[in-house]
Image (tube, rainbow, N blue to C red):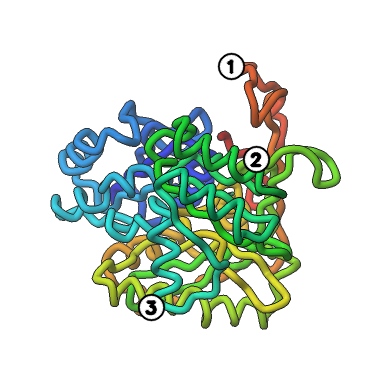
Amino acid sequence: MRVLLVGSGGREHALAWKISRSPLVEKLWITPGNPGTAQVGENLDLAVDDLDGIVGFARAQGVGLVVVGPEDPLVQGLADRCADAGIPCFGPRADAAELEGSKAFCKEVMIRHRVPTATYRVFSDLNPAISYLQGGARYPLVVKASGLAAGKGVVICEDARQARDAAKAMLEDGAHGAAGRTIVVEDFLDGPEASAFALTDSRTFVPLESCQDHKQLGEGGTGPNTGGMGAVSPNPMMGARTADAVERQVILPTIHGMNHEGRRFQGILFAGLKLTPAGPKVLEYNVRFGDPECQVLMLRLKSDLVPLLLACAEGDLDGCEAPEWDTRPAITVILASQGYPGKYEKGIPIHGLDALETGDDLQVFHA
Ligand code: GLY
């Protein structure tokens, strides 16, 4: 089979590495990819938002599976375009990808289908937002840009002044552009974070092993939040009972709820959770693999990934064998340029990677 993987991060290198090991795969392209993905497949020069280019290439080359790494092309409708062209695509259509594309929609779905989440309000105008923030709101609370803001649209506010500044920056001053024209204000949830992933074809789902990213930049949990300075799997906070509660209270009602709303979800459902004393509650949904969480998951997955991805795309997940996992834990540690996640120098050569003895137990993924 010919496979086309869309994206260029560490997640895509990890996916490309795993896909390239499948005996089913005769050719793997990654677009645009990165120098790491070029070691396991052939990179293309098509941007992730070049939907015409991606679908045209896939059709011309007889691609049997398109795998979409990041959320933006999914929200823009790449899975719909592939479906129109008759090409199986791993990743939800745009109407289902709205779970990540709009935090306001995501909250509505959770409330409608009784998925545990924080109490919230939605605002598109500053004055009512300020009235609420200076009136009945309880602190700390969280102000979020509703749209896609590359992981930067969430502000935890300790008091009304901080909350007003965050709301004004998004609603009036254009921070995050169109993504911040609507904001979600929600109660702050206390407890450890956890990520839960489930593959689904909308009829059935397969939970993946637990894992957790580590967001803070500095040693000892200090410094600003990043996309993730590392990840571990399994997540030591996610015991069997919690995992079971997440499946019953979060994953299942969300997939059923999306079916009920006429927005069939197929692909990977990624629930960002807080494990509160009252049980797991959803902070947000993502519609793609987490990064760097994907890296530890791919190292621990012993089964072939490709049949699972294809089954999600084709609605045949029930016919797949349950995935086998390495029982040993895995960790990812990120090496980032000085200054990250703020301004940082790019293009600095990294030496010495060739000396590493990589294999099933150690991989270097480029992001
Ligand atoms: N590591 C968090 C994310 O992928 O959204």
Q: Position of residue 291 (x, y in %)?
A: 56, 47
Q: Is residue 312 above or below residue 150?
A: below
Locate residue 242: give its quadrant: bottom right
The residue at 30%/49% (across/down) is 66
Which of the labelled discs sits on residue 29, or is there none?
Answer: none
Residue type marked 2: Thr
Q: Secondary structure at mark 2?
A: strand
Q: Name the mark nearer the viewer: 2 or 1.
A: 2
Nearest to N terminus: mark 2 or mark 1: 2
Can residue 206 be seen at all in this image of the molecule?
Answer: yes
Q: Amino acid at mark 3?
A: Thr
Relative to residue 72, is residue 235 depicted above or below?
below
Q: Would residue 177 appear left or right of 242 to someone viewing this image?
A: left
Reading the image, the residue beneath label 1 is 347
Q: Nearer the viewer, residue 308 or 231?
A: 231
- Whether tag 2 and tag 1 are in contact, CB under 8 A, the answer is no
* Residue at x 45% of width, y 39% of height: 171
Ranked by sequence position, the earlier of labels 3 and 2 is: 3
The answer for how far apart the CA atoms under marks 3 and 2 are is 33 Å
Residue plotted at (56% across, 49% down): 143
* Mark 3, secondary structure of its residue: loop
- Please rate how many residues cluster around mark 2, counting C-alpha atoms within 10 Å: few if below 14, some from 14 to 19, many from 20: some
Res 320 visible? no
Q: Is residue 275 above or below residue 169?
A: below
Tell me the quarter of the picture where residue 199 sits: bottom left
Q: Nearer the viewer, residue 251 or 157?
A: 157
Q: Nearer the viewer, mark 3 or mark 2?
A: 2
Q: Which residue corresponds to mark 2?
A: 226
